[in-house]
Amino acid sequence: MIYPVILSGGAGTRLWPLSRAQYPKQFLALLGDHSMLQTTALRVNDSAIFAPPIVIANAEHRFMVAEQLRAVGIEATTIALEPEGRNSAPAAAVAAALVRGADSDGLVLLLAADHAMRDPAAFVDAIRRATPAAETGSLVTFGIRPDRPETGYGYIRVGVERIDAPGVHAVTRFVEKPDTATATAYLAEGGYVWNSGNFLARADILAIEIARHAPEIATAVEAAVANARADLDFLRLDAEAFTRAPSISFDYAVMEKTDRAAVVSCDPRWSDVGSFAALRDVTPLDDAGNALTGDVIALDTRDSLVRSSGPLVTTLGVERLVVVATADAVLVAAADRAQDVKIVVDRLKQDNRPEATSHPEVHRPWGSYRTLDRGTGFQLKHIRVKPGGRLSLQSHTHRAEHWVVIEGIARVTRGPDVDHLETVDLDKNRSIDIPLGWVHRLENPTDAPVAIVEVQSGGYLEEDDITRYDDVYGRD
């Protein structure tokens, strides 16, 4: 059995302002109706070949992972939570430990959560070709046949084909991201493939090779898994042990050192969607070479990516630009600087700008909220509660609130303290006050969405002004 393990720990700085640390690109629907995470899970959703997936994710993203999988009808075997990102090598060690615990002969399929494959059947075919080699002890990576001199990817020099596994080749060497001249030479010479960062290996062999080449990682992860604890439907890795693991990629820690490396060449129309240039490459283009998404009007515009998830964006008489607008930020960049967006994010972090890490719409396990307006002593929010969603029973020290129901039927619990609570159901257009210091809860007992407008007033309006008395999602 092949066990897909989806690595969902990216921070998403290269696609800012679309992708941000609190909502990175794997949760975005960049190329259709499904998010990158959902598309990755659906790609291996065939019970004849694959077991249900394991997901390794940042603890802060746990409810988004669970909700997005639920929305496409996929139930993960385990959602393992990293206390902090430590790159892909520690995550691979976690994958090996979890699969070994379930099936000592199982194959681990390490998958990035945020890659695009527009021909998923070609990738599944490559997995089939890789399976015999993985079963006999190889660590197989999937190499993408290049169609251009790309400088944004690492390369693999393909060696001789294995007699015992048709379509599987030895790895001669791994090559760092080349300059344009070198990449052009690789393309002309042939025998080089892009390193996709997806792998297939037997769980026991994977664990052995990590222990052999990255013993600090193996020791830390072994303790992190052994001391992990269940938290609702999640598995929390032990934080003290896990953070002792060095932060390093699986390629550097293991694949470039092991003598078991092998590669399968394939063409699933792959992209890591790691920059706006890459996003343009996988987006349908108009006759002028533009990738246009959202409320956009492009006049006399050529070879540009223009995308809006917020206001109307218009362009006139420009070419080779990246223009990306969200509700709270706009990026305008030269197309040949698309790889450098991280510089912008670093500057925002230096200036302590919230736009560096979060969107105006903040996702919670019960739904979401968006700040509509804010000023001295007040804040206006649009709050949506999904069917069955239930906020914590809570109170605030510094603010009062007024709620107006604008969609659905909201159930409100409130009272001066936890021993004197009343519950009322409010229809659309009804409102209610939450006085300063009162205990309260908002929930949706129906199978339709609920939305309210919340007006906060007080001397301090930050999210940390909250005391929780009960929370079905186990938050402090």
Image (cartoon, helix red, strand yellow):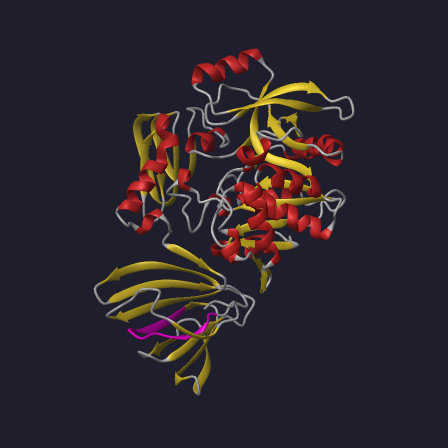
Residue 78 falls inside the magenta stretch: no
Which quarter of the picture shows residue 396? bottom left
Q: Is residue 466 above or below residue 236?
A: below
**Image quarter in which the N terminus is found:** top right
Q: At 32% across and 45% down in the image, what residue appears?
A: 329
Q: Residue at x 43, y 84 (%)?
A: 418
Camera-side residue: 87 or 127? 87
Q: Give the main secondary structure, helix, strand or loop, of the magenta stretch.
A: strand
Res. 222 visible in picture: yes
- Examine the rendered structure and indicate whether residue 169 appears above or below residue 403: above
Q: Is residue 323 visible?
A: no
Vertical comparison of 201 with 241: above or below: above
Q: Please give the range of residues in magenta.
A: 391-405
Query: Percent x, y for residue 117?
Result: 58, 34
The quadrant of the image that shows the C terminus is: bottom left
Q: Report the residue at 54% width, 66% height from top.
A: 387
The x and y percentages for residue 453 are 36, 66
Residue located farthest toward the right when viewing the structure as drawn: 164
Residue at 48 percent across and 48 percent down: it is 85
Residue 30 x %, y %: 49, 41
Residue 439 in which image quadrant: bottom left
* 251 on left or right of 368: right
x and y percent of residue 278 in the render? Answer: 46, 30
Please name whichever residue, 109 or 94, is drawn nearer the observer in this view of the structure.
Answer: 94
346 lies left or right of 38: left
* Above or below, comparing residue 381 to residue 145 in the picture: below
Quadrant of the image occupied by residue 71? bottom right
